[in-house]
Image (cartoon, rainbow, N blue to C red):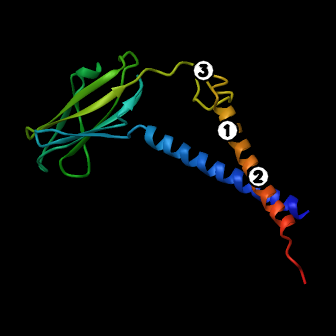
Amino acid sequence: MRLIRQLAATVGLSVLSLGSAAAGAGALVIATTWPAQAAITDSPGGATGSVDPSSVTPGSSVTFQVFCASLDTASATLAGATLSLPEQIPMDKESAAGVFSATVTLPSSIRPATYTVNMDCSDGSSATATLTVTTLPKRGVGVQTGDGTTSTQTNTGLAAGGLALAGVGVMTGLVALRRRYALQRRYPTRQQ
């Protein structure tokens, strides 16, 4: 009975450590591939511009924001012609002085590319923001999740790799238990 408890504990610890390593690797992949939420561009005109999100698909809403050089700036405009929008789009004044924003919906016909959008302040300063438009995801295409039902490819080796790692953990636990058990049989301790 004691051997079975030791085996269960070792296997459990092996699987737990493998699961922790896999979760850490997954978190690292997510952290390094997650898209930026805002692109901020500093321009020589003294103003600073941003776009949120910085990477979108056609038909998405995007918010542009400009921080004008002067706090007394009365207005700002967004040059929308590069995005197939009206040429001059007035920006709304924010609660902070010299800050303006405009939320626009991109046309569904916009081509995937990287666009540089100009924002002009009435004080003469200007800024740019860079927006990346990507292609629309194909209908029915899911995220790469291994051999799951939403995966675009099956049998990519992710499931086999995970199973192999779990098997290595179990084998390592068994070898450690066998060695420990053999040592106990060879050098028994006296119980008094």
Which residue is rendered at x = 78% and y = 52% of the image?
A: 174
Determine whether 156 is above or below 111 in the image: below
Q: Dot 3 corresponds to which residue?
A: 140
Mark 1 and mark 2 residues within 8 Å of each other at the beta carbon: no
Ranked by sequence position, the earlier of labels 3 and 1 is 3
Q: Residues within 10 Å of mark 1 (few under 14, many from 20)?
A: some
Determine whether 112 is above or below 9 in the image: above
Ranked by sequence position, the earlier of labels 2 and 3 is 3
Task: Look at label 3 and name its amino acid.
Answer: Gly
Determine whether 153 is above or below 178 in the image: above
User: Of the numbered discs in the image, which one, if any, rests on residue 162?
Assistant: 1
Taking the image as shown, residue 178 lies to the left or right of residue 66, namely right
Q: Of residues 188 and 117, which is closer to you in this image?
A: 188
Residue depth check, mark 3 versus mark 1: number of the one nearer the observer = 1
Question: To which quarter of the image does residue 26 belong?
Answer: top right
Residue 95: where, in percent of width, then height?
A: 26, 51
Task: Look at label 1 and name its amino acid.
Answer: Gly
